Amino acid sequence: MSQSIEKEELLLSSIKDKFGDKVSELYVNPKRIKILVDRENILNVATFVRDLGFNQVISAGGTDFPKEDSFVVDYHLISVDHEDLKRIIFNLSTKFPKNEPKTPTLMEVWPSAEYHEQETFEMLGIIFEGHPRMERLLLPEDWNDIPPLRKEFKLPSRLVEHGSS
Amino acid sequence: MDTFEEFLKRVITIAFWLLLLGPVIVLPIILLVLPQFGVPVEVANRFLIALINPLEMLQFIDSLGIGPSSLFFKIAAFPGFTFAALFATLMILYERKLLAKMQNRVGPLYAGRFEGILQPIAELFKLIFKELLTPEKADKPFFWAVPFLAIAVGGAFLALIPLSPEIYIAKSEIGLVIIFAILSFTPLIVLTAGWASANKFSFIGGLRALHQLVSYEIPLILSTIGVVMLSGSLDLMKIVQAQASMWFILPQFIGACVFFVTMIAELERIPFDLPEADSELVAGWYTEYSGMHFGALQLANYIKLYGFSALFTILFLGGWNGPATLPPVAWLFIKMFVVISFILVLRGTNTRIRIDQLIKLGWVYLVPLAFANLFIALAVASLGIA
Amino acid sequence: MEVVDQEGRTLTFSIGPQHPGSGHFRLIVKVDGDFIVDVKPDPGYVHRGAEKMCEERTYIQNIPHLERPVIFDSSGILFPYVLAVEELLGVQAPPRAQYIRIIMAELNRIISHLYWLAIYGIFLGHSTMFMWPMGDRELFIDLAEAIGGTRVTFSYFVPGGVRNDLPPEFKERALKTCAYFEKRLKEYDRIFFSNPMFLKRTQDIGVLKREDAIRLGVTGPNLRASGISSDTRKDEPYSSYQTIKWDIPVRKEGDCYARAMVRFQELFDSMSIIRQALDLIPEGSVKIAMRGQIKGKVGESFARTEAARGTMFYHIISDGATHPYRVKISVPSFRSLCAMPFLLKGNHLADMPAIYWGLDYWPVEADK
């Protein structure tokens, strides 16, 4: 089933026109766009994408890639009131090395990113500069181990498997 | 003991054997031993005769001063405390069954042969056997005094309400004023309970109850002044006599409505049950009361319900007036039954009101309505209708 | 913990998690008299680490696992997962399975909304409003049990279709239940939604205007109550929803009453969708046969669906193994955490249950 990706390509070309090679396109599919931005430029690109019409953050999370020694933070954006943008999910991602886990917060651009960023801090240890509350949200208060979604953290129940079963 | 019925069977069996063997063995001993201690033989004799002859029993009890027309009987049995307590337990059962039928379920079903009729008695036994917990930091004399005070107020309230021209406990020419004076003790009791419990939820509940009860006393009293004007007396007997031709609910419809609403607020029932809002305050001012303390507070609550509905019937629905096919007491109870059913149905169909809406309702709407009702009563009285 | 500030003016205390009015969730509230000055939500009481556990289990083993956060709307939280996995595998469920998925999802939506209505009754103090929805909900749970085998958490959706076919005589049973329930909903309207006391407790309380709703990240019925016509089933139709016709209920006021009425209207819409799906359902197989362990291709996929509470979103990254590399779940309740302090500030403390539960925040889902 081939769907037209005219609108998606239009959006992508307007972003490329404005930002040139600061933005690298990862893919454009029907209903899906993904771009990769450096963390220095992410605030400007985010503001531009918001003005295009994507006004809600539906999810913001991070992934740990130990093989490439980097973190990737993904923001997924949707538009709830622009009729022609409603079907698209826009993925804005940024990649940075693991030994400097910092990136600017996008809370001023999208207030709905507030709790997602706090959860990402807690689970991966990535600091979002400018966020008012980089503190515990879901984990218990007496958690004293490394952030759990990092790949070095092994679930204690799985560690036992080597000996038994 | 498996069921409540088996327990009752055992109790009755024991009573039966006692009654059989008692006169045969114990009483002759009494007849022979008591005169040694100075009890006159005639009294013992009359007692023994009375055990066999019921009519003699009545005279014997009368001579002791606790017969059916004595004050003791009236206070303790009918229409006093025992009757009120039984009526209250029946009302609890009726409320639960009515609510259950409205809500698509069955309510109490298993205690007793017929639709759970012994459920309140079963609960009474349960409450008697529970531990009476007192919080550590509570103010013990006041904490223990509250259930007694609550029942005392309820009982005093009941004592002034006549059930028919012949059946009454106390009579007074200013009966209505005394009733309101007794009722105004209730906020004090609630506040004492909330403070003495040493629990912040109880305290908040006590304060809320205080606001509610005090705000709603004024429309309560004002709405009855119209009735007093139309009947020309504060005595409850004369108020009922004055309704022989027409019930006061017709010229005093607004007053009756105001009285009904404030009555529900004084009883702390839904929709006015903020003091015990259990999704916010656990149970309000009686959170810390357990076992028989809790039983006593619930009993006092339902005795007040009985008293208030009787008062509403006497003031507005013609009391015990009715065709002579049934005794007056029966008419009073039929009308009370209708009023109580109304109050119980309101519980099943409404949500709880918020505190600022409650205070606004009391002061901004009900008080002016009660005053308007006063002027209507003046007009009606001067036109000589009733 | 209770703290009175320096001037003795405000009191900070916590509502929950052991509180009849809060669910398993804590709100740290700062009040000045009866007015709420500041609110800090504190989720995490039932956090289980679902995202981490998904990385240690195969794609099929994750299914019963991911259902648990919302046990009574389990199809809602599982639907985007199976759609994302199917996208990774490059398959699509057969048409009969797609329609059965619609039926199951709508049944779960009705079950979830009735549960919400019952607990709303408890919070507002209306005991009949608790008893009736819970009783009628049993009929729909029986229907779901006929399809899925259990009363809650059916583990019914699998990548490639559904686990088993509909039982015989299902259509007649479903139509009979829907006819009975539509009659009952008229009584609900009379006793709950037109009740003056209910209107007093919910109208003009917790007003969320259109711009604020978009800005704060609210989705689902809460968004539709603020005047925005947005529903994932129509914006990005999945699983044959494009063949079904219905109108999205939208209301403009944005207060608690509007949110309640939107959910009430959705009950009617769900039954209409079930009827249409039962008419349109084609014959055929219900599952694509898959051999051995599922291994996704290297890459990522994301999918979103409309659960009972809002838009549910999954992001799965795979490196070709039998376990997913990363599963990111975004639940609608977590997103309404942003709107909660905004709505509660400045209101009476007694309005807290009405606003908090009116947003349909489910703490277990938000904690994952």
Image (cartoon, helix red, strand yellow):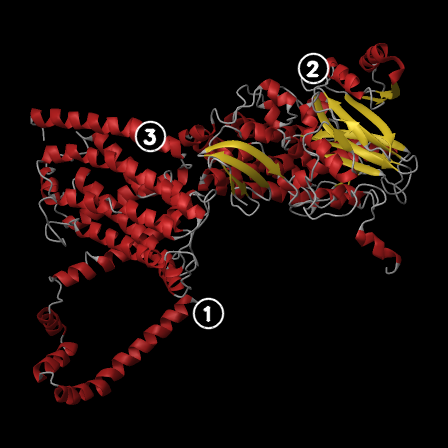
| Vertical arrangement, residue C273 with respect to residue A123, above or below | above
Task: Name the subunit of mark 2.
Answer: A
Query: Which mark, by number, is residue A82?
Result: 2
Mark toward the start of the polypeptide (1 vs 3): 1
Query: Which mark, by number, is residue B342?
Result: none
Few, some or many residues within 10 Å of mark 3 (<14, 14–19, 20+): some
> The C terminus of chain A is located in which quarter?
bottom right
Seen from the viewer's position, the closer of residues A34 and A6 is A34
Q: Residue at 80% across / 46% down in the picture?
A: C61
Task: Name the subunit of mark 1.
Answer: B
Query: Which mark, by number, is residue B361?
Result: 3
Query: Which image quadrant for residue B24?
Result: bottom left
Determine if residue C164 is in view: no
Q: Residue at 25% across / 47% down in the picture?
A: B185
Which residue matches tag 1? B2
> Which residue type carries mark 2?
His
Few, some or many residues within 10 Å of mark 1 (<14, 14–19, 20+): few
SS at mark 2 in the image: loop
SS at mark 3 in the image: helix
Few, some or many residues within 10 Å of mark 2 (<14, 14–19, 20+): some
Task: Give how far apart the Cα atoms at labels 2 and 3 are.
Answer: 46 Å
> Which residue type carries mark 1?
Asp
Report x, y in % for residue B257. Answer: 26, 32
SS at mark 1 in the image: loop
Report x, y in % for residue C294. Answer: 88, 41
Q: Is residue A151 left or right of residue B234?
A: right
